Image (cartoon, rainbow, N blue to C red):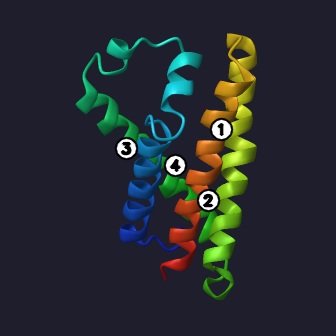
Amino acid sequence: MVYPFINVWAVLVGTLALWVLGALWYSPVLFGKIWQKEVAFKEEEVTKGNMFMVFGLSFLLMLFMVWALNFVINAHKPENVSMFMGLHYGAFMGFFFSMMTMGVNYLYQRRSVTLWLIDGSYMVIGLGIAGMILGGWR
């Protein structure tokens, strides 16, 4: 197998962008209160536990996602890779893989459509942004 080009900085910045979007997405500024209600978390439960581990491991998992997205985007000829193409592939992967996987799981878990839309839309938009970074940073 031939491994495509990996711009380590673009992968790290794309991961950081996805992570920061998540911090904003799940904050009270955007969907934090609705999400908290949908998962039945009380205020004290949100900050309970080892937050360093939660944030650190979530960053690592996002790094794996963005790294894999890099493989998809950069499997093409370099002249065909662009910011728009990265957005397209990132949003595509976010919608058809992340959001649909969540949908299947949420059906069995009897989770709400609202929760699915909050979580799934975050992945579509976040991976779209990460894809733009990967595609545009040549």
Coordinates of residue 89 in the picture (x, y in percent): 68, 62
- Of badges 3 and 2, nearer the viewer stands 2
The amino acid beneath tag 1 is Gly
Pointer 4 local density, CA inside 10 Å: few below 14, some 14–19, many at least 20? many
Coordinates of residue 58 in the picture (x, y in percent): 39, 37
Callout 3: SS: helix
Q: Which residue is mark 4?
A: 65
Residue 112 can be seen, yes or no? yes
**How far separated are the C-alphas under marks 3 and 2?**
17 Å
The amino acid beneath tag 4 is Met
| The one of 47 and 6 positioned closer to us in this rendering | 47
How many numbered discs? 4
Callout 4: SS: helix
- Above/below status of 109 relative to 138: above
Nearer-N-terminus badge (2/1)? 1
Coordinates of residue 61 in the picture (x, y in percent): 43, 41
- Residue 50 in which image quadrant: top left
Residue at 32% of width from left, 13% of height from top? 44
Nearer-N-terminus badge (4/2)? 4
Residue at 66% of width from left, 48% of height from top? 94
Mark 2 and mark 4 in contact (Cβ < 8 Å)? no
Q: Which residue is mark 2?
A: 128
The amino acid beneath tag 3 is Phe
Nearer-N-terminus badge (4/1)? 4
